Amino acid sequence: MNIRFYNARIVAPSQKDKDNIEVIKGEVWVKGDTIVYVGDGKDSDKVFAQNDIIIWNREIDVKGNVLIPGFKNAHTHTAMTFLRSYADDVPLQEWLQNHIFPKEALLKEEDVYWLNILGIMEYLTSGITTSFDMYLYPYATAKAAEKTGFRTMITSGLNNFTSSVKEVEEQYFKINDMSDRIKFVPGFHAEYTCSKELLEELSAFSNKYKLPVWTHNSETLLEVKECKERWGMSPTKFMDSLGLLEYGGGGYHCIWMDESDYDIFKERNLSMITCPASNLKLNDGIAPVSTFRKNGIKVGIGTDGPSSNNCLDMFREMFLVSGLANVKDKTANSIKAEDVLKMAITDGADAMGLSECNAIAVGKKADIVIIDLNQPNMQPINNIIKNIVYSGSKINVKMTVINGEILYADGNFNIGIDPTEVYEKANSIIRSME
């Protein structure tokens, strides 16, 4: 599909400083899945000098609203939609052992497929165009993304109980061959759910193919304490000692870090993904986001799963990243709104190795969201970026485009499935477990 967006405000890389963003007025042209023009329209002749004549399938008057690159949910367990509001108000280990793991043991692969589609629908309403998913039955996750047209990155939740390195290797080759919108990298659930022998085997696999590795890391004080009792070192140091971090990757949560852990993250070019809403709800703690950033470590933002959040909403996460950093650092300006928005868009994409869809710029993939300014929470228009970060919400998501395809607009889904069927499936899955 070829789409011309005009009369728009555009959040784009700054003309003066490519590491920053700014709001410009103009047009965005999409040819197929790629952005071919961003500008005020006065220099558009150069596009036709490099392309055949573009016949527009859609010309969309943005009416002064904002085009942003889609949000990147850099850590989630999408199919946990079936446990939304099911096991709340308990700490992490009790939540996992007594409530979550027993229900997950009853899941079938087809269940995970439908539960992923429910989550994808929520992502689209929140302006999220990519998720980084770790869960059971990764083929079902991939098939749900393929069916709906959603962009997803998948990592394995390898642990002592549900999978093997041989399975991870098979998943790596098969899933990466499914679609250019679906990618797979190795990962494991956490240090405390994996034997040393299993992690050594995963390390050998990742080093053989020079692949990044991802995992939950230092989410709770108990996790870090018990790791030090087992191995005499922090989870980050333990992973590094096994060679798991040779080719990058990163950690989810990363709340209770030793000073030397930051050096390892920087040396290995690792990224940290913060999930503030989930961490607050489970009383895990407040991640040292500003410390990671001051050490030159890339930070992305994730929602975590909908059973611990309980919603998949990047607006809420952005506000919490900013507010909690201020509380932790005892200041009112720990992280600027512009930097928080970049974390939710560009830095999350770069952490996942998806630099092709990290900005609205020529040559990038057309993952674009229209933010509606004609809502009370966006008025008056004093500062658009601050409005998005501090007062934005799902109500402001007017359209979500992935790979040049409009998958959601004005409350309607274009994903090839009737939403009513998805809701019925999700409810029947959890009711069958009672």
Image (cartoon, grey):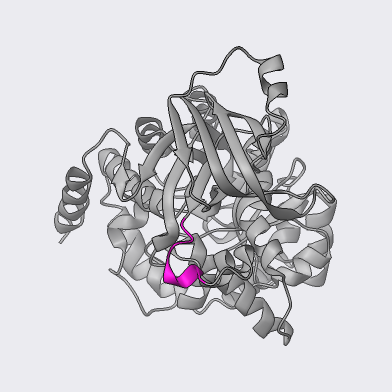
The residue positioned 27% from the left and 43% from the top of the image is 114
328 shown above or below 24: below
Left or right: residue 317 compared with residue 19? left
The residue positioned 36% from the left and 35% from the top of the image is 148
Residue 377 lies in the magenta stretch: yes
Percent position of residue 75, x then y: 53, 54
Give the residue furthest to the front: 42
Give the residue furthest to the top: 52
Left or right: residue 56 compared with residue 345? left
**Image quadrant of residue 91?**
bottom left
The residue positioned 55% from the left and 48% from the top of the image is 67
**Image quadrant of residue 252?**
bottom right
State the residue in front, 294 or 17.
17
Give the residue furthest to the bottom: 330
Left or right: residue 42 compared with residue 102? right
Residue 69 lies in the magenta stretch: no
223 shown above or below 366: below
Quarter of the image that includes the C terminus:
bottom left
Percent position of residue 40, x then y: 67, 40
User: Number of marks in the image?
Assistant: 0
The residue positioned 26% from the left and 38% from the top of the image is 110
Whether residue 382 is visible to the viewer of this picture, yes or no, is yes
Main SS of residues in magenta: loop
Percent position of residue 327, x then y: 65, 84
State the residue in front, 184 or 195.
184
Whether residue 137 is visible to the viewer of this picture, yes or no, is no
State the residue in front, 271 or 387.
387
State the residue in front, 38 or 322.
38
Magenta extent: 372-379
Percent position of residue 297, x then y: 78, 58
